[in-house]
Image (spheres, helix red, strand yellow):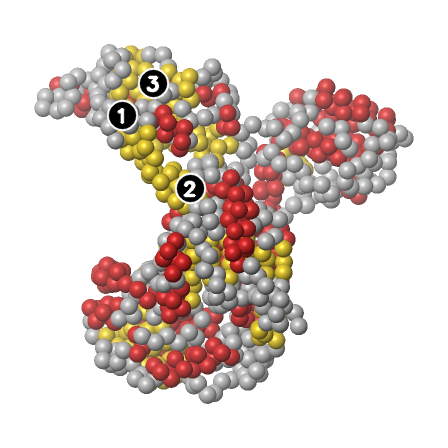
Amino acid sequence: MKKIQHYVNGQWTEGTEEGAPIYDSITGEVIGNIAIEGLDIPEILNYGRTKGGELLRKMTFQERGNMLKKLALYLTKRKAAFYEVSYRTGATKLDSWIDIEGGFGNLFANASLRKLFPNQPYDVEGEPIDLSRGGRFMAHHIMVPKKGVAVHINAFNFPVWGMLEKCAVNWMAGVPAVVLPAPSSSYLAEAVAKEIIASGILPEGALQIINGTVRTILDTVQSQDVVTFTGSAATGRILKAHPQLIQEAVPFTMEADSLNASILGEDAAPGTPEFDIFVKEVRKEMTVKCGQKCTAIRRIIVPEKYMEDVQIALGKQLDKVTIGDPRLKEVRMGSLISKQQVEAVRLSVTDIAKEAQIVYGSLDRIETVGADAEKGAFISPILLREDHPFKNTIAHEREAFGPVSTLMPYKNLEEAITLAQMGKGSLVSSIVTNDNAIAKEYVVNAASHHGRILVLNRESAKESTGHGSPLPNLVHGGPGRAGGGEEMGGLRGIKHYLQRTAVQGSPTTLTAVTGIYQANSAYTEIDEHPFAYHWEDIQAGMSLKTHKRTITDGDIVNFANLTWDHFYAHTDITSLEGSIFEKRTAHGYFILAAAAGLFVYPNKGPVAANYGLEDCRFLRPIYHNDTVYVRLTCKQKVDRDVASAEHPSGIVKWFVEVFDVEDELVAVATILTMVQKKQTTFVEMTAETIASCLAKLTTENKAQWGTLTPQLMLEHLEFNYKICAGEIQDFEIVTPEKILEKVHNTLYNYEKMPPNYEFPLAEKSTMTIPKHPDLETAKAAFLEARESYLAFFKERPEAIVKNAVFGELNKYETYLLERKHLNHHFEQFGLL
């Protein structure tokens, strides 16, 4: 019998005992066995802390984010195989999409957060704090990765999403993970983990996975570790009280199943769009994942006058739900995860039904499509009705973790809020109303008991992600019964794995520590103008002091006329009495414009564009005939992605200080510039470089990849020069239109062409049959074609030529293509 494997200590392994069987949820067949005996848990945790932790902590946030993005793309290309495995958990295609692609979406979403962090391995939080009147003693908060592991104890219902929504966050923070999927669906988590490990994208030790219940997992956790738990509230409370967690003060985040409520607003009468939205939302949340969602709607709270209408409408919606083999298109709901879960749901429904009435569905009868109801873990949707929800409280206390929900009435909104709160804390609540006053009253008064509140109406419904969908950039968690924890939430989630530390010192010291220039810090004088430096060479504190400029009366008047800004302080000196101004005053924006005129570098260089303005303050007026100068200092560098037709670049934030002749500070601002990065990947293809490479090329040179000979390689390059010179244009662009722009823009990046790329015009260029008699003739023809290409664009600098892969190219883009292309093939034959 196949055993579900674990990946620990850098290798795939199995437990030493026979283990317990895991079953196919649809057919009841045994998928494999799970055994954990023989695993050294303390060693596994320590391996993550040392091997994985050391590598992750050295990476910058940008590197970690790009790692997640690369992993998400890698897994997305292989998603079809995961769907086939997911069907065995009882999940339909939609259910699987939420789990699988929702998990990948968490990787993408967290990857994008790298743009909000500094270009270094640790974060700098908030604003600097001045601790002295002289400005020479200050503090700032930094956040560094914890030197432990993230131990994730996950639930069975979302084996992929549950793993990746947590790991994406701890990886972004620079912390490795040890994941413990629930046994009943661990085979799907195992399948995804195998692809992750095979990709080689993560540093070794960043992910370890133990597929089984390890009751000793918390016995040796340490103070630098973080533990998260998703599952039942009862189990969570037991884990939260573990003596080792208390002894070591280990952060513990709990996300427990909760009795989430959805409220129908009093305005949402039958016949309104909101009524229909409400009924469909409840049906969806009852049946998606067969109701096995910690965010599913368990309590349906509606105005008492609409109870019958909702019951009837919801019954009609549930009638449309076909149950059976999730691989079939006509099936809308699959099965529970296991027969044991079926019995657990039956017991819970029986308990709730002691007070409430079952008004739809049956615990004893089920019709299935394409599957044997006896062999699979199938159950019917169950709707209960509780007409006395204040008197009878089981529906507020007992959860049936399946396609089960309870309908209950309220008399007024205050009652609805109270009923929602009787669940004692939930992950999510929702209200469907088109009355914003009702929405506000519910949200403000109910928020204390819910981690997230969704307001649905006709305006938002079409684009809403739904009641039960946690999103990576929103907090997922809730108070009370829901566990009292928080996961995800964008930056908040990442900071859970970082240690916040207040650092005190001089501004100059804190500039060095944080990598961000702090006001009053010592300046670093430089030899050249700062705008002459590439992004990599610019450092925080690099500074330029400009020459001076006197602001004239004419400057102020002219600026007013140019901008139409005729505020009285600038144009009407007879109206200054009683104001804060003494004389004609320069516009604040003129001061900034004049400052730019003093510090801007006129020559073409690495600074590609002005990117924006932040934190502008005008501290005191500048009058006509006052003289100012500027201090321009690098404040911070922020990396950025470039996908358009531009070269790789980063953002540099410059601290601009405007002083008068008395060295009094007049104005401050932060300007942002887009600064190009150095191109160090490619050798420039000058005539001298090409001649040198050709001199090294003989018939004895062997290709490091591909099947080209030296002569065929040159003939291929000659052919492409003729394309760039417009001599050969009788072909079609083969790149699909939807990705052509993206492919075209890769000419601007500094990434090498991939080896073994199949040239789309290979047959046209006869790349397998030499057309010249020998290599020397091919060299001469290659050089002649290059000269023709250069002459073509010298005579026609505005010309546009067609390329089969990259589309239409101008003169500069053909130069970029030539540089990449020649580097590619000259490296292929060891000439560079």
What residue is rendered at 71% in x and 41% in y? 755
Image position, residue 284 (x, y; %): 42, 70
> Is the residue 570 above or below the residue 169 in the image?
above
Q: Give the secondary structure at mark 3.
A: strand
Q: Can you say which quadrant of the picture contains the C terminus? A: top right
Residue 310 in view (yes/no): no
Question: Within 10 angstroms of label 2, few (less than 14), some, or many (20 or more) residues?
Answer: some
Disc 2 and disc 1 in contact, CB within 8 angstroms: no
Of badges 1 and 3, nearer the viewer stands 1
Name the N-terminal-most of marks 2 and 1.
Answer: 1
Q: Amino acid at mark 2?
A: Val
What residue is rendered at 63% in x and 55% in y? 11
Q: Amino acid at mark 3?
A: Val
Q: Amino acid at mark 1?
A: Gly
- C-alpha gap between disc 2 and disc 3: 35 Å
> Is the residue 61 above or below the residue 683 in the image?
below
Residue 680 in view (yes/no): yes
Name the N-terminal-most of marks 2 and 3.
Answer: 2
Q: Which mark is residue 135?
A: 1
Image position, residue 350 (x, y; %): 38, 84
Kindly identify which residue carries mark 3: 630
> Is the residue 807 above or below the residue 357 in the image?
above
Question: Within 10 angstroms of label 1, few (less than 14), some, or many (20 or more) residues?
Answer: some
Q: Nearer the viewer, residue 659 or 320?
A: 659
Kindly identify which residue carries mark 2: 144
Image position, residue 210 (x, y; %): 55, 61
Name the N-terminal-most of marks 1 and 3.
Answer: 1
Residue 811 occupies quadrant: top right
Q: Nearer the viewer, residue 730 or 163?
A: 163
